[in-house]
Image (spheres, rainbow, N blue to C red):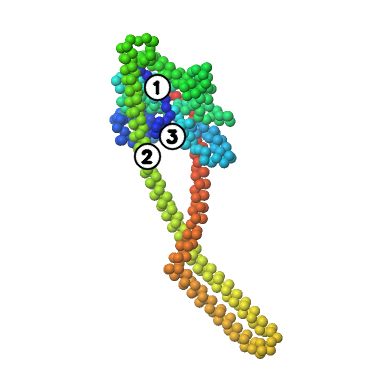
Amino acid sequence: MMRATRHNGRSGAHGTYNPKHNDREFDLDNAVDINKEMTPNNIYWNCYQGFTFHKDRPDDWMSFKDVELLFYKEQFTGWLDAQNERHRKEGHRKRIKTMEEVVMNKKWCPEETIYQIGNIDGTIDYKELAMVVTETMQEIDRRFGEYCRTMDWGLHIDEKTPHIHERHVFFAPDEYGFDMPQQEEACRRMGLELPDKESEPGRYNNRKMTFDKECRCIFLEKCKEHGIELEVEPIYGGKKYQEKQEFITSQINMKNQNVQIENGQLLIDNSILTETKSDLQGEIRDLEDEKLQKEMQLQDVNEFINDVTKIAYDKACETIIEDIADTVSREESKEISKLKAEITDSDNLITKALGKFAVEQLDKLQRRLSGIKSRVVNSLKRSFNSSAKKEQLLNKIADAARPSVLEILGRRKEAIAREDKAKALEVPSRKHKYEQCL
């Protein structure tokens, strides 16, 4: 006789469970435990688009990862925005999170449930499993859907035993009235009691245990309605007194069942590891591309700075040198005019005697200096435009300007990123409704 398995979890040794395993959004070539020829017959469901076979997924089909992120944005944006704003006001900017980080956080991530009937030695038709589990989740949604919502599930027939991965999230209002992902408060609002009302709540005495018990009872009841005979008695510990042989037999059965469960979990973990490896390889390629892109962008910025510096340098040579020459010429003329006035106005007899001659010589000097200006300007331009001098000065100017230019560009990129993030939060509202099964 077969047994029904309903197992929950959020994370393992490698972090939170990734929905990519459930909808096969990863490279199947490296997944040795998956029969790729059977994958097209896998069945998927999500709360926005309903049912589809793997082979019939439309162009606008949403991956489970996108479904869950969209659901979280619709359900929890008010809570996250308010929480982030409090962190900003309190100066705790490192605590600010994006919705993507919330979905992957062990505290707030979806819970995953695996449904399976039988094992590799005997099971039921996968379409019947889909119908039983669909009816089970519809009943769970009817009873508890106000505070717990199924977002997606995938039925895998491309592994050794057909099974379903279903992902849901618990939620309830926080102290400010915003819905947030929280499990125990959601179960309390469902009206569920502690398993042991006389003891303090804790890891082995919480309302989630009551929720799981109720869901398992629903699952078994739906199996019964479909005429599926299951072993519902405990594998061991039935009669208070047992003969030695009966006790040994029950222990062997228990160990066999545990080995089967562990083997199934190892297969799932292996698929997750294979997928994680594929994801990491993809991330490494993305990082390499990003590094190359940043290097190219930095090179473009440096070329831009050098081009601007050259233009500014040439304009400076044309304009500033002439301005300097004009200024020097005016100052020289002022000094000579002042000297001529001093000679002319002097009461000294010798100065008066020589004054006329001296003033004439100073007039000649003024005229010569006026002619020298163009030669000085041309000489300076030749000096500043010489290859060695120009290269040296251009490097100094570019080095001095680069930090300021990069800072301005960085601030602009941050502003654009903030604008894109604000637009991304503006998501459409959709209804969550179960569709009829196959």
Closer to the chain start, of discs 3 and 2, is: 3
Residue bearing the label numbered 2: 280
- Residue at point 42% right, 55% down? 299
Real-space Cα separation, disc 2 to disc 1, in angstroms: 30 Å
**SS class, disc 1:** strand
- Residue at point 56% right, 29% down? 174
> Which quarter shows the N terminus?
top left
Residue 174 visible in the snapshot = yes
Q: Nearer the viewer, mark 3 or mark 2?
A: 2
How packed is label 3: few (under 14 Cα within 10 Å), some, or many (20 or more)? few
**SS class, disc 3:** helix
> Which quarter shows the C terminus?
top left
Q: Which mark is residue 66?
A: 3
Real-space Cα separation, disc 3 to disc 2, in angstroms: 19 Å
- Evaluate if marks 3 and 1 touch, with contact meaning CB atoms under 8 Å apart: no
**SS class, disc 2:** helix
Relative depth, front residue between 195 and 46: 195
Q: How many marks?
A: 3
How packed is label 1: few (under 14 Cα within 10 Å), some, or many (20 or more)? some
Residue 437 visible in the snapshot = no
- Residue at point 52% right, 30% down? 180
Residue bearing the label numbered 1: 6
What is the x, y in percent for residue 302?
A: 44, 56
What is the x, y in percent for residue 312?
A: 50, 63
At label 3, which amino acid type do we have?
Answer: Asp
Real-space Cα separation, disc 3 to disc 1, in angstroms: 25 Å
How packed is label 2: few (under 14 Cα within 10 Å), some, or many (20 or more)? few
Q: Which of marks 3 and 1 is in front?
A: 1
Q: Which mark is residue 358?
A: none
Closer to the chain start, of discs 2 and 1, is: 1
